[in-house]
Amino acid sequence: MITTDRMAAVDANAAALGVPRKQLMESSGNAVAREVRAVADPGATVVLCCGRGNNGGDAFVAARFLSAYDVTVALLGRPESIRTDIARENWAALAECEIPAETVTDSTDLALGDPDVVVDAMLGSGVTGALREPERSAARSINASDATVVAVDVPSGIDADTGDPTGAADTGDPAGTGAGGPTEADDAVAVEADRVVTFHDRKPGLDAVDAAVTVADIGIPAAAERFTGPGDLFGIGRDPASHKGDNGEVLVVGGGPYTGAPSLTARAALRAGADLVRVACPETVAREIQGFSADLIVRDLPGDRIGPNHLDRVRDMAAENDVVVLGPGLGDGDGTADFVRGFLDEYDGRAVVDADALRVVPEVDTDADLICTPHQGELVGMGGETADDPDERGDLARSFATEIGHTLLVKGAYDVITDGDDVRLNRTGNPGMTVGGTGDVLAGAVGALAAQTDAFDAAAAGAYVTGTAGDLVADEVGYGLVATDLLDRLPEAMRDA
């Protein structure tokens, strides 16, 4: 099965792989037409009730494949309000093909007549809120007819993820006149379909629908799900009304023997969208780390190494942040492993664990939600296994993620991302990124994204955008890139996705 959000991501990834949405719409429309042909003989009357999105566009295409039938297309709304270019193109094609089409701009305008088949293509998956006019009256008319009802993707008015009726809207019409939208009594209005044609994979909510469900293969390649892509960034963005801190506060804990690593991580988190990034580091290197950027907030800890005596202070700082990135530049000196062990033992938030902090993870029973970012050598040091074949590596990483109970992002020519259930591969990036410091950039990007979405999705999106940033640099300067080159390209990588 596939959720609505993931389906949207897969569509975008397919387009990035060279399978345009227009081609997918053509295949979807053909699948709808096949379902109509399965329930009615040539010459039967078919009314396609179409919305203004891509769900309606699928039905516009279907009409062209039903030349042996008495077809009428009813658009609910004005043609100029059709929301996507490909749906508009297919609406225009109806007139050129002389296929009967009408527009319905008022709830009283729809006259179904007595068709043999009605195609419900009003609203697809991902729609929220109770049905409004004219869709609400259209749904009632469809339900009152004797026609066989074929729904496109999901019956209008049904949540594709839950199978429940879509939520009530705020009507502003307490008297129930219908002037402002659906009233409380109308909240559950939904199309009662006899058949549903859904695409690529079954949606979870269809299990609750009393209808025959056909899953149509529309040509989305397996790679659109197997590999990360621009769709993996869906849902990650900024509310125009957000305030400082709403888009994530990240604490980087590291430094001591190294100063560049925590700085790279912190600056990458800022470039990947975090509002505030703090660095907790030994006082002996605090001034140097601050010197890398005025954008960083540096919190110094007594001494020249982070150790158990800093636990209380770091725990207090962690409690004030959304995500902790633990390990960049921490080193493996006396006391650092004890610090990591002690911190994770009592921490129950989300953390990205990198570098020398990784080896402690399998030893600790923690309530924290961890994203571990080892390269293959570090993975083996943690007790995991690896292989040359990406799919075999994915299986081994999935098994190890299940064993330790955390999300893994295993770096390599093909990164492997797994939470023990799902596995995704990332193939952005290039051989120039074997230079030191790119892993620190990745940890920071994942940390920023983990403040906005769940651990697995943050790891997948972080791998994708960091690799894409590296590719943008390599396109310009070749393989002589350095880790700091990636920082300025991270926003571009996220924007272009």
Image (cartoon, rainbow, N blue to C red):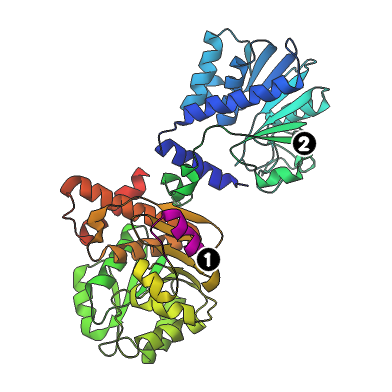
Q: Secondary structure at mark 1?
A: helix
Q: Residue at x 80, y 15 (%)?
A: 114
Q: Tags 2 and 1 in contact by the CB under 8 Å rule?
A: no
Lower sequence index among marks 2 and 1: 2
Mark 1 burial class by Cα count in 10 Å: few <14, some 14-19, many 20+: some
Query: Vertical placement of 173 versus 316: above or below?
Result: above
Distance in Å between CA atoms under marks 2 and 1: 37 Å
At x 59% / y 45%, what residue is drawn?
4
- In reply to whether residue 476 is colored magenta, the answer given is no
Q: Say if 174 sits above or below 433 in the image.
A: above
Q: Which residue is mark 1?
A: 399
Q: Nearer the viewer, mark 2 or mark 1?
A: 1
Is residue 229 visible in this depiction of the protein?
yes
Which of 293 and 114 lies nearest the eye of the viewer?
A: 114
Which circle marks residue 497 in the picture? none
Magenta segment, principal secondary structure? helix
Kind of residue at disc 2: Ala
Question: Are there few (<14), some (14-19), or many (20+) residues within 10 Å of tag 2?
Answer: some
Residue 284 is situated, as x and y percent measured from the top left of the image, at 22, 85
Q: Which residues are magenta?
A: 386-399
Vertical arrangement, residue 345 with respect to residue 388, above or below: below
Q: Is residue 390 magenta?
A: yes
Q: Is residue 411 left or right of residue 11?
A: left
Task: From this view, report whether residue 172 is shown above or below residue 450.
Answer: above
Quarter placement of the C terminus:
top left
Q: Is residue 488 left or right of residue 274?
A: left
Residue receiving disc 2: 211
Which residue extends farthest bottom? Answer: 309
Q: Residue 270: x, y in percent?
A: 32, 62
- Residue 410, quarter of the rendered image: bottom left
Is label 2 in a helix, a strand or a loop? loop
